[in-house]
């Protein structure tokens, strides 16, 4: 019996089908069980062939990726990787809606290039698929709403905390949305979020979050001061840091673990000037990014929270934070907002 990861592709473009097939067949770890031209065909293939991982496009005829994801997660849950172009048009379905419906991660659609480009894309894509294979998935009722309590009308104490920092990777967009959806417009401090994400997708994530939470969400600009009740993300494929005077800046630092943006770069920058004035949260993700930065914040008097293994899609980053003693609190996702409020 083959130990290869069994994959089904759901994609309407014959050219993209050919490119993906060519890329994945070079890996001795992946087996493509079948290819569907739309979500309706994809559902039938999944039922018939029972793959380990499903890769789907967003925009397709007959049944698009969003409806496909909703139906699949309701009847036969599988780890889903969305392979799609990043769409910016206001009338387009945002690719992150699929993550809200149960997909795990996004990956940019390969649209051509030289052989060396395909090799690099192939390494990244195979790595994503390998991570997704181990992700636990469950039936999802898409009529459900977030169970996180709302803290819109809470009265805040005069705390020394000035910044909330959040770092995440695989599974992070939905986890971040879960936490931020419980915050009202009167949230008393700025929120800095660092999410590992493929090139070109951060604008779509900001747009999706803006439509699903009450806080203002934006991409940081060089030299601006972070304002309360606002969520800031790094610019596309750049690190976010802070100056002594509280202005945000783009850092050219080289990350020790190769991630851009890097949670560690951001956490350590805040530790340098505002260590005792922070709450830092490390959520789901592969690897160790953010753990050493969180430890620096803790040593300087910052309050630190790591997501518990019971809710983390990938228990990597928060696990390392726990192992090195960086996490003051370890909590399931639905308890993190409440803890944040108790510390402010």
Image (tube, rainbow, N blue to C red):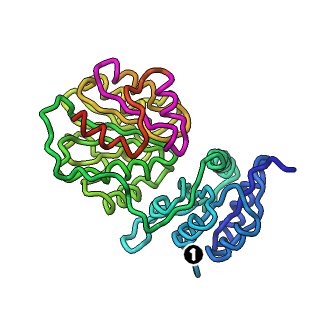
| Left or right: where 228 falls relative to 271 | left
Q: Secondary structure at mark 1?
A: loop
Does residue 148 appear anywhere in the picture? Answer: yes
Return the x and y of residue 263 as percentages of the image width and height: 42, 35
Q: Is residue 247 above or below residue 96?
A: above
Q: Quadrant of residue 65?
A: bottom right
| Percent position of residue 83, x then y | 58, 60
Where residue 170 sits: x, y (%)?
Answer: 52, 46
* Residue drawn 47% across the image and 37% down it: 308
Extreme residue toward the top, this view: 299
Q: Which residue is mark 1?
A: 60
Q: Quadrant of residue 144?
A: bottom left
Find the magenta span and give its range. 298-323
- Is residue 318 shown above or below 77? above
- In the orientation shown, which residue stands out farthest toward the right? 1
Q: Residue at x 54, y 38 (%)?
A: 315
Residue at (57, 77) in percent of width and height: 63
Residue 263 seen in the figure:
no
Q: How many marks?
A: 1
Position of residue 247 measured from the top left corner of the image (x, y, whole percent): 22, 36
Looking at the rendered image, the quarter that the C terminus falls into is top left
Q: Is residue 97 magenta?
A: no
Apparent side of residue 195 relative to residue 108 in the rendered image (left or right): left
Looking at this view, is 167 or 320 the one in front? 320
Density class for disc 1 (Cα within 10 Å; few <14, some 14-19, many ≥20) is: some
């Amino acid at each position: 019996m083959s130990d290869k990861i069994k994959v089904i592709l759901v994609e309407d473009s014959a050219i993209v089908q050919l490119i993906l097939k060519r890329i994945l067949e070079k890996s001795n770890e992946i087996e493509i069980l079948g290819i569907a031209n739309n979500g309706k065909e994809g559902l039938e293939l999944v039922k018939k062939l029972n793959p380990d991982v499903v890769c789907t496009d967003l925009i397709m005829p007959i049944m698009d990726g969003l409806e496909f994801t909703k139906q699949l997660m309701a009847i036969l849950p599988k780890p889903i990787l969305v392979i799609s172009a990043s769409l910016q048009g206001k009338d387009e379905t945002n690719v992150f809606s699929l993550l809200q419906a149960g997909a795990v991660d996004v990956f940019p659609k390969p649209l051509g290039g030289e052989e060396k480009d395909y090799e690099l894309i192939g390494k990244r894509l195979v790595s994503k698929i390998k991570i997704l294979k181990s992700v636990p998935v469950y039936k999802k009722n898409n009529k459900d709403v977030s169970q996180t309590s709302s803290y819109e009308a809470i009265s805040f104490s005069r705390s020394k905390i000035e910044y909330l920092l959040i770092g995440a990777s695989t599974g992070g967009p939905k986890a971040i949305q879960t936490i931020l959806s419980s915050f009202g417009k009167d949230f008393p401090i700025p929120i800095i979020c660092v999410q590992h994400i493929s090139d070109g997708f951060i604008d779509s994530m900001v747009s999706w979050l803006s439509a699903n939470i009450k806080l203002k969400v934006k991409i940081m600009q060089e030299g601006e001061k972070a304002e309360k009740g606002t969520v800031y993300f790094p610019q596309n494929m750049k690190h976010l840091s802070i100056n002594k005077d509280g202005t945000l800046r783009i850092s050219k630092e080289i990350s020790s673990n190769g991630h851009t943006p890097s949670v560690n770069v951001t956490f350590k920058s805040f530790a340098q000037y505002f260590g005792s004035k922070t709450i830092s949260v490390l959520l789901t993700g592969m690897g160790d990014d953010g753990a050493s930065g969180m430890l620096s914040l803790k040593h300087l008097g910052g309050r630190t929270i790591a997501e518990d293994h019971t809710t983390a899609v990938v228990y990597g980053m928060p696990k390392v934070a726990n192992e090195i003693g960086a996490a003051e609190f370890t909590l399931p996702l639905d308890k993190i907002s409440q803890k944040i409020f108790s510390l402010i």
